[in-house]
Image: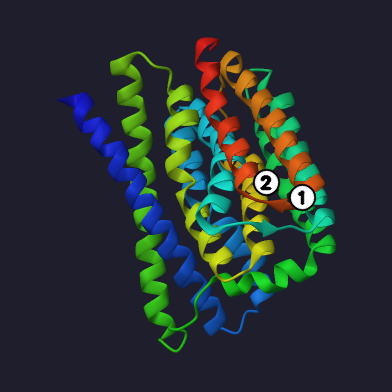
Amino acid sequence: MEAVLAILGLILGIIIISISSDRAIKHSSLLAKAMGVSPLIIGLTIVSIGTDLSEIFNSIISCALGHGDIDVGDSVGSDLTQLTLVFGLLPIICGTFYVNRKELIIMGICEILSLIVIYSVVEKGYITRINALFMVGSLVLYLTIIYNVTKETFIESGKIIEVTEIQKSKIYHIIIASIAFVGVTISAYTIVQSVIVISSYFHVHEYIISFFLVAVGTSLPELAVDINALRRRENQIAIGDIVGSCIVDSTLSIGIGQVLFPQAVSANLAIPTITYTIIASFIVFVVVAIRKKVDKPAGVLFISLYLLSYSLLFFL
C-alpha cells in the first residue's frame, strides 16, 4: 500500500507542479506588466526561469531533506529531456520551424559549457557550497552573453504570455501567484518524498528515478510554453526557451539547493548520464546548426537520442 501511495503521490505531484508552475509564471508576468515592468525584463527573468520552477523547488527541497541525488538527477535529466524529447516532439506536433544559426550556436556553447562544469564538480562525489555558488553565478554570465547576441529574441519573449487579464487588480495577481508558488512547493515536497519511498521499496536508486522519470514530469511546462510559442509562429522564442531552460537547469536549478544544503552525489551514476547528455546535446546543436531547421526527421532523431539514454540502465 505504501508503494502504491508513493506512485500515486509522484504522479499527482508532477501534475500539480506543472499546473502550479504555469499559473505562477502567468500571474507573475501579468503582475509585472501591470506594474510597468518591460517585456524584456519579464522575458529574461520570469519566462526563462519560470518554466524551471519545478526543478528549482525540487532542488531546494531534495537537498534540504538530504537527498542530493534527486536534485542532480532531476536537473540533468530535465536537461536531456528538453533538448531531445521536447525538442523532438515540437516539429511532430507543430510542423517544421527554422532557427537562427548564430543564436543557436552561442546558446549551445553556453549550455554545453554548463554541463562540463557540472561534470567537473560532480565527479568529486560532493558539491561544495563554493562550487554551487559558482554554478548559480555562472547563469548571469551565460544570460549576459546570450542577451548581447540575441537581443531581438528576448525582446519578443514577452509575447509568450497572454495579457488578456492585465487590467485585473495587482492584488488579484499577487494572490493567485502566491497560491501557485505554494502549490509548487507542496508538490515538489510530495515528489521528493515519493521518490524516496519508491526507491526504497523497489530497490531502485533515487538518482535513476529522478533522471528517467521525474525529469519528464518537470519538463512539461517547457513543452506547453514551446508549443504555444510555435503556434504563434514565434520560432526563436521556442528555441530560446528550450536552450535557456537547459542552461537554468545546469546552473540555478542544480546549484540553488546545494548552496543552501551542500550534499554528496553518487558520481558513479551521475557521470555516465552527464556524459551522455553532453554528447546528445552536441549532436542536437550540430544537426540543427547545419540544417538551420527542425523538421520531423530531426524530431525522430532527437527522440531516438532520448530513448537511447535508457540503454544506460544496463551499465548503471
Tell me if 125 is positioned left or right of 290 in this view. left
Tell me if 266 is positioned left or right of 286 in this view. left
Identify the residue at the far top of this view: 315
> Of residues 233 and 56, which is closer to you in this image?
233
Q: Label 2 amino acid? A: Ile
Residue 286 vertical position relative to residue 182 in the rendered view, above or below: above
Q: In which quarter of the image is residue 190?
A: top left
Q: Which of marks 1 and 2 is nearer the N terminus?
A: 1
Distance Cα–Cα, label 1 vs label 2: 9 Å
Residue at which label 1 appears: 107
| Image quarter (top left, top right, bottom left or bottom right) of the N terminus | top left
Residue 173 vertical position relative to residue 181 in the rendered view, above or below: below
Q: Where is residue 161 in the image (x, y as percent from the top left)?
A: 53, 72
Q: Label 1 amino acid? A: Met
Residue at which label 2 appears: 247
Identify the residue at the far front of this view: 297
Residue 154 vertical position relative to residue 78 in the rendered view, above or below: below
Q: Where is residue 265 in the image (x, y as percent from the top left)?
A: 57, 21
> Which residue occupies 74% across, 25% down?
120
> Which residue occupies 48% across, 37% down?
215
> Which residue occupies 30% across, 24% down?
197
Q: In which quarter of the image is residue 195?
A: top left
Pointer 1 local density, CA inside 10 Å: few below 14, some 14–19, many at least 20: many
Give residue 117's mark. Answer: none
> Of residues 128 and 315, which is closer to you in this image?
315
